[in-house]
Structures are given as structure tokens and as C-alpha cells.
Image (cartoon, grey):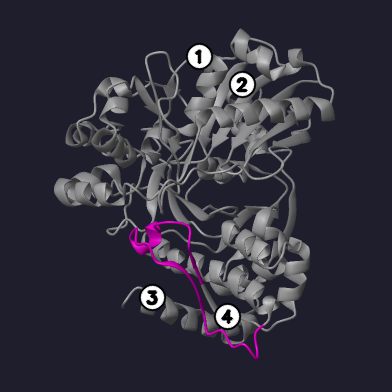
Amino acid sequence: MKYLLGYDVGSSSVKVALLDIETGKAVATATSPEQEMGMIAHRAGWAEQHPDSWWQEAVNATHKLKNKYNFSADLVAGIGISYQMHGLVVVDKDLRPLRPSIIWCDSRAVEIGNKAFADMGDDACLGHLLNSPGNFTASKLKWVKDNEPDIYSQIRHFMLPGDYLALRMSGTPQTTVSGLSEGIFWDFAEQKVSQALLDYYGFDNSFIPEIVGTFAPQSQLSASAAAELGLKAGIPIAYRAGDQPNNAFSLNVLNPGEVATTAGTSGVVYGINAQPTADPLSRVNSFAHVNSTPEAQRNGVLLCVNGTGILNSWVRRFAGGLGYDEMNQLAAQTPIGAEGLTFLPFGNGAERVLENRLVGGHLQGLNFNTHSSAHVFRAAQEGIVFALNYGLQVMSQMGVETQTVRAGHANLFLSPLFREAFANTTGATIELYDTDGAQGAARAAGIGVGVYDVKSAFEGLNQIATFEPNEALRAVYAENYARWEQALNKALGE
């Protein structure tokens, strides 16, 4: 029996999965820490984490895994890595972090990216980068250049969070085309790093690490890292990808017309396009998908709503720490629309789908004589679904169809109410699968080391259930979505 290891580096925890190559099934998983990792927020709208904390939790999770399932490190054929997207890690000549990572939900670089979009123009940004530089990794690096010149002067390389975990494992700084595209460093028209972007921001080309294939033996586990992890030196690191491209891969979403969704800390819908398309307002974003090549481009169109699972978690704490199952049961006892209670779930930083505006979270229509905590629970889940539907309308304008979407049986998709609201608001059939980001990263590593081809990699993927929209319920949800959209427009001053 041989195995593959997959690591998923989130902003709340690091998860590791052990996949049996022969069956394609996960035989064990482990997560660390038990409680959510903290974020550093020196100012409103900022969010940082130290890269070494990801490494330490990866070590802890690996030891938990080994305690759960006694496997031989000699039998691990490859390692794959999934990671929180858009974060900035900067390292010095000794490859040590110079500062905490500015992570995905940090809003400090919004105006830097907006100015770049205005200065560089539509053709350079939308025609080549497929996006405004926005609040992405490149703009975060420019913030460091402008505000922390002493740190900037010491930078040897910048990288994404998964690149840093791979660096700690191997000692080799590397990145991928998909990773560069999510940082808005990739020129899709010329299929190379964007020199125009580097020149505009004044970045040295040497900041970019070696570019390696997404599915490939990229580097090997070093002796020192192997000792910390309790593994064997020399295991190939054979895959890395941002969490949303990886989530799509985990669900076998690789070709035009296929769509994946997830509702963890943030909520995402990710659809595949063969053509390099851009939203003129950069409300949804296009990145190179994990299987994209110059000959057969596969671009992931990504809709992100920052405040999804984090809103549900906030409501849970606000309500005194009820279990999620109990919250779902109480919410289901209230009618669709929560009797006029409306939740705008935008309290987790600048929202790309709202053109990087800081709208904040809003609870509207509260009636002290009508509404209970159960109504709040329902309004929160419906508000998340409505926000995703708002973005889906933008994706539709770009040619992304959402007749069927695939999701992992996790996070908010564990809630029957959420599934009902999603299917009947969007009109999409939901297919649920027994997988997650760590398992997907392990499968992908199997392709990277050659033990799987794309078809065989998914033979162990198990579909759990299918949920169809109901025409009668669709009409009720449409009425309540219209009320929600009116509340959003009012909040936006429109």
C-alpha cells in the first residue's frame, strides 16, 4: 500500500489528508489547531498571519495524523499543497520571512490597485491581466514598498502562502503560473510574467521565484523538514495551487461549463472558461486554472464573498455558542425570508463583487416583537446565498453557466437550509461530494508524480447527494432576493 499526502493551508487551520493510492480514498485526516488560528489586525481592514505559524500547524497536523493512522513514511509517494489565495509573503536572502503575511482578506491595498487600474488602463489590465490589480498580491507588495522601505530593501523573493509552505518543506523558492495569476502578475495575452505590471510598480524581476509546473515533481522534502514532520527525506512535492482552483480540482471541475462552489470562511463560485474573459469592473476575477496550458487555456472565473462562514461563526458566538446543527434546526422553523429580516453579509473587508467597497455587515428590518435568534440564523444564511447569487449574475454576463454546481460536503453545505436556499435562489442543481481541499491536493500530487492520470485520479471520488431546485420555492426565494437586493442598493447609495 502506498500513500499521498495533501496539505490545505487555510486562514483558520491547516488540514492534512492521507490518501490510499490504490483505492483513491482518504484513510485519515487531521487538523491543527483545534481552535481557529488568530489574525493580526493593527488597523481596521487589516489582516495578517505569520508564515511560520502555518508551518508549525502543518507539523502539528502531520503528527496528529501519524497518531491516528500508523503509516510508514517510506510509503509516501508525493506531497500536494493547497493554500489560502492572494496572500503576500516576503523573504530575505536567507529565505526567512521579513514580516507577517498580508493575507487574502486584508483591505489595505485597495486604493493602490484602483490607482494602478486607472493609470495602466483597460487594455493593459483587462486585456492582459484579466483583472484590475485591485487588492491582490502585487498591490500588497507595492504597499510594503511605499510604507516599509527598510523591509522592502531586504526582499529576495515574494511568494504566495503555499509557496512558503513548500519552501519550508524543501528549501527551494518556487511558484506557479496559476499562483502568479492570482497575484495579478501574469500576462494572459503574452503567456508570461507581466513586465508592464512589474515596471509600473517598480518591482525587480528577480523577486519572482523559479516558475514550476502545477503538476510536477517540483522539489523534494529536505532532511531537516522531514525530521520535523516525522516523514522521509526526498518525498517529491508534486503540486501546489490556491484553495479555490484546488477546490475545483478536488471536485473534478477542469473543463469549460463545469462549476465548483464552497462556503467556508469565504464563499466562492468558480467556473471554468476556455477564453480569457474579464469583467469590466473586476467584480469577479479570472485566473489561470490548475490545468491551463498555452495550447489549451483553462481559466477559472472566481466570485468571492468574504463574509460567509465567518458570518455564521459570528452569529453562533453572538448567540452564546450554540452548535451549528442546533442553529440550522432553529432557522428551519422560521419562514423563507425570515419574516422581513435582511442580512447583508459584507462585514469581512472590502468586497470585490462590490467593486472593492467597504460596505460592512447590515442587519435590517429587525422587529423586537417578531424576530428571535432563529430568524437571525435564517437571515444570515439567506443573506450569504443572496450575495453569491448577486455575483453569479456578473459571471453569467461573462458566459459562465451555473446549471449544475459541485460542492464538498462541508462547511455551510452541511446545512439543509443553506442547500435549499442556494438551489432555489440560483436555480442550480447541487451535487455534493465527499472530498475537501487536503484530499484534492493529495490526488493532484498523484498526477504530479505519475501514479495517476486525470481520469484515474477521480475514481475514488464519491458523490453523496444531489439537490434539485423546486419551482414553487424558487418563486418565494426570488421575491425575497429582490427585497435583499433593494437593501444592498440602499447601502451602496444607489
Q: Position of residue 439 (x, y in %)?
A: 67, 37
Residue 216 visible, this orientation: no
| Residue 354 belongs to the span the image colors magenta | yes
Query: Which residue is at 66% across, 22% downward?
Result: 451
Q: Residues within 10 Å of mark 3 (few under 14, many from 20)?
A: some
Q: Which residues are magenta?
A: 344-371
Marks 4 and 3, how far apart in space? Answer: 21 Å
Disc with the residue nearer the chain's start (1 vs 3) = 1
Residue beneath label 2, please?
450
Q: Amino acid at mark 3?
A: Ala
Q: Position of residue 433 (x, y in %)?
A: 70, 50
Compared to residue 236, the image places residue 58 above or below, namely below
In the displayed structure image, the side of residue 408 where residue 123 appears, left or right: left
The image quadrant of residue 480 is bottom right
Quarter in which the C terminus is drawn: bottom left
Tag 3's secondary structure? helix
Compared to residue 493, the image places residue 300 above or below, namely above
Q: Residues within 10 Å of mark 4 (few under 14, many from 20)?
A: many
Residue lying furthest front in this view? 42
- Cβ–Cβ below 8 Å for labels 3 and 2? no
Tag shown at residue 171: 1
Disc with the residue nearer the chain's start (4 vs 1) = 1
Residue beneath label 3, please?
491
Query: Which residue is at 33% across, 40% downward?
Result: 140
Marks 4 and 1, how far apart in space? Answer: 52 Å
Q: Residues within 10 Å of mark 1 (few under 14, many from 20)?
A: some
Marks 2 and 4, how far apart in space? Answer: 47 Å
Tag shown at residue 15: none
> Toward the viewer: 372 or 16?
372
Disc with the residue nearer the chain's start (2 vs 4) = 2
